[in-house]
Image: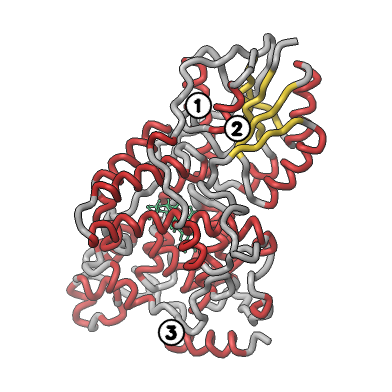
Amino acid sequence: MPHTHIWWIRRDLRLHDNQALFSALQGADQLIPLFIIEPELMAQAAPKRRAFLLSALAELDRQLKALGSRLIVRQGPALPALQALTAEVGTLSIFAQEDFSPFARQRDAAVAEMMDLKRYPGVVFQHPESILKADGDPYIVYTPYKNSWLGHPLPTPADCLPSPGYLPPLPPGLESISLPTAASPDGFPATPKAALGRLTAFTDQAIRQYNSQRNRLDLDGTSRLSPYLRFGLISAREALAHAHIARLRTQTDADRAEVQTWINELVWREFYTAILYHFPHVLKRPFREDYQHIPWRHAPEDLAAWQNGQTGYPVVDACMRQLIATGWMHNRGRMIAASFLTKDLLINWQEGEAWFMHNLVDGDPAANNGGWQWTAGTGTDAAPYFRIFNPITQGLKFDPQGDFIARWVPELRHLPTPFRHEPWKLKPEQTDQFGFRLGSDYPQRIVDHAFARQRTLEAYKKRN
Ligand SMILES: Cc1cc2nc3c(=O)[nH]c(=O)nc-3n(C[C@H](O)[C@H](O)[C@H](O)COP(=O)(O)OP(=O)(O)OC[C@H]3O[C@@H](n4cnc5c(N)ncnc54)[C@H](O)[C@@H]3O)c2cc1C
């Protein structure tokens, strides 16, 4: 009997630095590169995220064909799909990159009970079980987690595995579902080449100003690698190895600090993955039990205004429209938008979490939940609830010329900078001068920030 191995592809859509693939190749006479369409996951995926995934799978298929193989696609759920494959080809071993969401862990546990499933690292660099407090408990605060995480050596490019130059053949006669074709969302070509190109360009240059520029909405100061990390077109190890080299190349403490901040962001990603792993309840309720009973408002019209970028607060609307148009939002924008929903509108963070997951090309349950709970003040490492973002000063600080607003809220483009942030401050004669009518060209504010702030402070106090 030939040794048949399955490389079960999930969040590792790449041939390079792939520990599951690398292991699957050892001793394999036949290799099945397999993707299983999970109906439950596909139904939840944002259209742009699904398009990115489909486009990345098509690219992977092209790369496999160049090596004499091809992608086999089957309909899920996973366990029956894998059992059907075993019936077709005989006994086999399955090699997969370990995933940490509750759905993935349950699925994998069910498969491992019935079949030979081997799991390998890759989604994150440090396994959630490997960064624990001295007493063996998981960390629930970022800074001590980060300090412990950084106590381990960073990888170098030499630690990353090369792409295989050869793949064993498929068993003869295997059928595959054909995937719908989809163009990857603008700005995010779904190829490992694009991902590596972006990583290299970013770590060669922009990373040296990352700390100073990462909060500016109007600048291109962040890597925009999130969809690539989400689906594993690059590995966490590669991203860290590149950052490590960038840090070694710095000459001054100030430059080192700029680079270190980016490494710290990758550690946030690992932290939230670990939180979801150790505390899966966060997907259903607040991390902190005492924040279960905040009297959230049921306000469908306000929610719709927020979702559609029609709140009358320019920076919030610009962020929300960027999300709808591109499937991506700047981290500062995510914080501003999330704060507005939870603190200005007093709408449950879970509504926002769901809307982001419906729209983000990088939508990731761990990072998204972590970001929402942090902003709402219900999470592990939460900003205290009385720290409420002022949407006007946030805009003025992080989009000083109003360029970001002008880009996404064209109704305000013709106004001078200060009025882009506060169009309600235009005097009547100026509204004629600029041909702009608040209320018809652009909405009035749906809530007064000072009033909303007070309302939220009282609601959070009353939560018990
Ligand atoms: C409310 C809210 C929701 C969020 N939802 C998601 C999400 O669904 N998916 C997602 O990947 N990130 C999410 N984030 C984190 C962060 O906003 C994005 O990772 C970042 O904006 C992606 O842009 P970038 O690739 O240019 O990031 P960079 O600034 O270049 O950072 C590099 C990488 O580090 C990781 N990262 C950076 N910041 C964070 C963070 N705060 N938490 C976790 N990982 C981080 C990402 O993988 C990112 O690609 C959310 C943040 C908030 C406040």
Residue at 22 percent of width and 65 percent of height: 414
Mark 1 and mark 2 residues within 8 Å of each other at the beta carbon: yes
Alpha carbon separation for disc pair 1 and 2: 10 Å
Quarter of the rendered structure image containing ligand 1: bottom left
Specify the amino acid type for callout 3: Asp
Nearest to viewer (mark 1 / mark 3): 1
Residue at 57 percent of width and 61 percent of height: 369
Tell me the residue that label 2 is attached to: 9
Q: Secondary structure at mark 1?
A: helix
Alpha carbon separation for disc pair 1 and 3: 50 Å
Rendering coords of residue 449 (x, y %)? 42, 83
The answer, for residue 52, to whether it is visible in the render is yes
Decide if residue 324 is on the left or right side of residue 42.
left
Identify which residue, 74 or 377, lies in the foreground: 377
Sequence-first tag of 1 and 3: 1
Sequence-first tag of 1 and 2: 2
Quarter of the image that includes the C terminus: bottom right
Residue 301, quarter of picture: bottom right
Rendering coords of residue 175 (x, y %)? 68, 17
Tell me the residue that label 3 is attached to: 448
Tell me if mark 3 has few (under 14), some (14-19) or many (20+) residues whose alpha carbon lies within 10 angstroms of its own. few
Residue 309, quarter of picture: bottom left
Q: Secondary structure at mark 2?
A: strand
Decide if residue 324 is on the left or right side of residue 45.
left
Rendering coords of residue 132 (x, y %)? 59, 60
Tell me the residue that label 1 is attached to: 60
The answer, for residue 406, to whether it is visible in the render is no
Tell me if mark 1 has few (under 14), some (14-19) or many (20+) residues whose alpha carbon lies within 10 angstroms of its own. many
Specify the amino acid type for callout 2: Ile
Rendering coords of residue 190 (x, y %)? 44, 35
Specify the amino acid type for callout 1: Leu
